[in-house]
Amino acid sequence: MANAKYEIIGDKVKLSNILRRKQLLYIPNAEKIEVFTIRALKDFGDVKKGDLGGYVESEYNLGTLDDCWIYGDSVVCGKARVLHGAKMYDTAFAGDDVEVKDSALVTGCSVITGNSRIVNYAEVSNAVIDSSDVLGYAKVKISSACACCHVNLKKARVKNYAEISEDAYIDDSCISGCARVHGHATVRKGSTVTDYADVSGTAVVGGTHGKVKISEYATITGAATVTDEARVRGHAIIDGRARLMHRSTVGGSAKVLNKAKIMEDAYIGGRSIIYGDTTIKGGGCIEDVTIGIPPEQGKDNGRCIYWGTLDNIRRYDD
């Protein structure tokens, strides 16, 4: 069937020249990719007959049905496709085997590569995404100050109503539900952040030894680190330079703050608060206990290490 929606016009333009003119992120093999301007042949959506659009390498890159469109200086090339009401604005780029479809929106200087899928009303702005899925009503909106400086999603999956913003980095992990990852936070190595969980600051979730799960209303912030199959759930808060590792769990309304360490299958729950340079380790269960002296009181309780359960807790001072 003939394309009655738009036509390809003008001479070939090297992608590298477009990137250089717009001072955009480097795209591999840009010197070898040549694209063309598109022009509308009829009215549809907010596009009028005769309007110029962005750039495509061939008609394969943009659907000929409904009101999907490539605006401004956006580029779609390779085997990438924009379909089913999706739109690309500004200087966004989609290449390789990318799919942008089902009313998805890609704006700013976003760079989408690999086999990424941006679908089902998802929104992406100023993000660099490699081989990742942004699905449902999920949003990935990187701040303009950090725009396109480095990869934000790599082999990641962001879905439902989850949000990634500011300068967050997601690597081989899933963010779902209404979870938020923002600031300069990192989630990596097969970890899951779901429900209403919030990860921010310079926090790091995930490491080389096992998957981490952050769920319910948990908050990970500051420069906290959660690794090694640890779990944080309920309304728990991990803040400061606290570390949670070795299959340990923090739940309930517990708080782990300052430089505290929870490790080796320990469980902290209830309304417990763990302060200072305290270490809790072993398979015990601690609930509704405060351990350590808050730094604001002007003194330190020393380095304390606790083993065992609430009923039989032992303390060893360095």
Image (cartoon, rainbow, N blue to C red):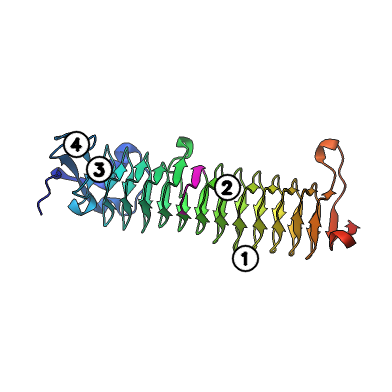
Label disc, if present, on residue 52 of the rendered structure:
4
Which is more N-terminal, label 2 or label 4? 4
**Disc 2 versus disc 3: distance between alpha carbons?**
34 Å
- Tag 4 secondary structure: strand
Q: Which residue is mark 1?
A: 209
Q: Is residue 284 above or below residue 169?
A: below
Give amino acid for label 3.
Trp
Magenta extent:
158-167
**Disc 3 versus disc 1: distance between alpha carbons?**
44 Å
| Magenta-colored stretch includes residue 157 | no
Q: Pick whichever, 28 or 280, lies toward us.
A: 280
Give amino acid for label 1.
His
Q: Which residue is mark 2?
A: 196
Of badges 1 and 2, the one in the foreground is: 2
Which is more N-terminal, label 4 or label 3? 4
Marks 1/2 in contact by CB < 8 Å: the verdict is no
Residue 261 % position (x, y): 75, 55
Label disc, if present, on residue 69 of the rendered structure:
3
Q: Residue 250 sits in which quadrant? A: bottom right
- Tag 2 secondary structure: loop
Q: Residue at x 44, y 40 (%)?
A: 147
**Disc 3 versus disc 4: distance between alpha carbons?**
10 Å
Q: Residue at x 36, y 51 (%)?
A: 119
- Tag 1 secondary structure: loop
